[in-house]
Amino acid sequence: MEIIGVIVAGIIIGLLGKFVAPGNKDNIPIWLTILCGIGGVIIGWFVYTAFGGNGSPGVDWVRWIVAIVIAAILVVIASTVTGRNTARR
């Protein structure tokens, strides 16, 4: 059941990461955005626990903010590496 939760959270976090990423990041496909979101959830959890985060009762907002920031970084990297050129000649 955790895998389904990570996938659903990855979809949401990926879209939020794409939204908060600076610049025009609409040049990557949606599947890559979802993968960046899943990566943001997983890597964000490891970063959060590495810096002493142990969770809190209820919704742990700090962990989700870390996941969104990491997903935004992954979206920027993915857009830079694999983005389609949208400039007109």
Image (tube, rainbow, N blue to C red):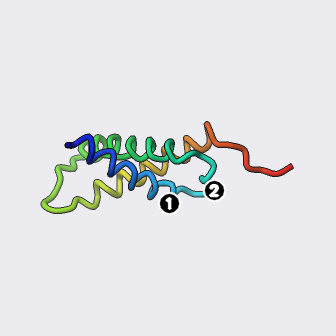
Observer-nearest of 38 and 69: 38
Residue 80 coordinates in the image, percent (x, y): 62, 42
Query: Residue type at mark 2?
Result: Asn
Residue 81 coordinates in the image, percent (x, y): 61, 37
Give the quarter of the figure containing the N terminus: top left
Residue occupying image coordinates x 51% and y 42%: 32
- Residue 84, label in figure: none
Observer-nearest of 46 and 58: 58
Query: Residue type at mark 1?
Result: Val
**Image-quadrant location for residue 85:** top right
- Few, some or many residues within 10 Å of mark 2 (<14, 14–19, 20+): few
Residue occupying image coordinates x 62% and y 57%: 23
Residue 71 coordinates in the image, percent (x, y): 44, 48
- Residue 20, label in figure: 1
In the displayed structure image, the side of residue 77 where residue 69 appears, left or right? left
> In what element is the residue under mark 1?
helix
Q: Are marks 1 and 2 in contact (CB under 8 Å)?
A: no
Pointer 2: what residue? 24
In the displayed structure image, the side of residue 27 where residue 63 appears, left or right? left
In the displayed structure image, the side of residue 2 where residue 25 appears, left or right? right
Estimate the spatial distance between the alpha carbons at disc 1 and disc 2, rounded to whole Å.
10 Å
- Few, some or many residues within 10 Å of mark 1 (<14, 14–19, 20+): some
Residue occupying image coordinates x 39% and y 55%: 12
